[in-house]
């Protein structure tokens, strides 16, 4: 029995007849196996919120987002890349990546250059300022990562990274 929940006009509250008892709710939740506090998607969301908060605190005063740091780190590691390759490596969709790259360009951290191998291809490259900035922020980003995983011992950290990679792929 699946019914759509529709908003009532005028903010009118629905009549709640035939509601299950608390005991019935508990029985059904146990049968389903649903416990919010143990639900993996809920826990991933909480971990993401914690990581975001740590990043924002660590990067206060920097005009940079975690996604921008990922792009800068990717360009540092792989060199000049076409936009679509950056998107594939970082798992950033085109609708997000295009304005992000414009922002990095406006900050003077990246620039577009024509590929020497194929004149039809534009590459994104770090500017000298981009190299300096990236080398400055990567240790901060790594410290955020370390702080996020601080509750885990070294062995658990390694295992966590192995497991989360399996899930992320």
Image (cartoon, rainbow, N blue to C red):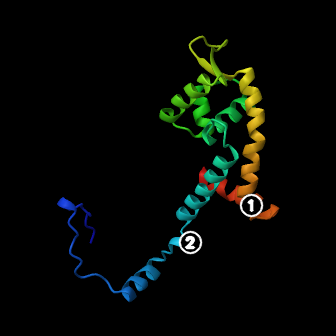
Residue matched to label 2: 38
User: Is 78 rendered above or below residue 53?
Assistant: above
Quadrant into which the N terminus falls: bottom left
Q: Is residue 83 above or below residue 151?
A: above
Check disc 1 and report its element: helix, strand or loop.
Answer: helix
Question: Which residue appears at 20% of the width and 75% of the height?
Answer: 15
User: Going 38% across and 82% down the picture, which residue do you hit?
Assistant: 25
Relative to 79, is 167 on the left or the right? Answer: left
Front position in the image: 91 or 23: 23
Marks 2/1 in contact by CB < 8 Å: the verdict is no
User: Earlier along the polypeptide chain: callout 2 or callout 1?
Assistant: 2
Residue 85, how many percent across, how many down? 61, 30
Residue 8: image location, x then y, percent = 20, 62
Q: Nearer the viewer, residue 79 or 20?
A: 20
The residue sitting at 53% across, 62% down in the picture is 41
Determine the image quadrant of residue 81: top right
Image spot of residue 63 (x, y percent): 63, 35
Question: In the drawing, does residue 50 fall left or right of residue 22?
Answer: right
Give the total of numbered labels.
2
Residue that numbered label 1 is attached to: 159
């Amino acid at each position: 029995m699946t019914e759509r929940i529709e908003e009532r006009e005028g903010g009118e509250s629905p009549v709640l007849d035939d509601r299950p008892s608390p005991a019935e709710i508990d029985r059904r939740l146990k049968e389903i196996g649903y416990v919010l506090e143990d639900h993996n998607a809920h826990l991933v969301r909480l971990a993401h919120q914690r990581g975001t908060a740590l990043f924002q605190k660590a990067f206060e005063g920097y005009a940079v987002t975690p996604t921008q740091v990922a792009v800068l780190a990717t360009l540092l590691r792989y060199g000049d890349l076409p936009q679509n390759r950056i998107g594939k490596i970082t798992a950033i969709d085109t609708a997000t990546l295009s304005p992000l790259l414009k922002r990095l360009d406006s900050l003077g951290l990246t620039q577009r250059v024509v590929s020497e191998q194929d004149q039809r291809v534009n590459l994104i490259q770090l500017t000298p300022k981009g190299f300096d900035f990236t080398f400055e922020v990567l240790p901060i980003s790594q410290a955020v990562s370390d702080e996020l995983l601080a509750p885990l011992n070294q062995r658990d950290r390694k295992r966590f990274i192995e497991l989360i990679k399996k899930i992320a792929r």
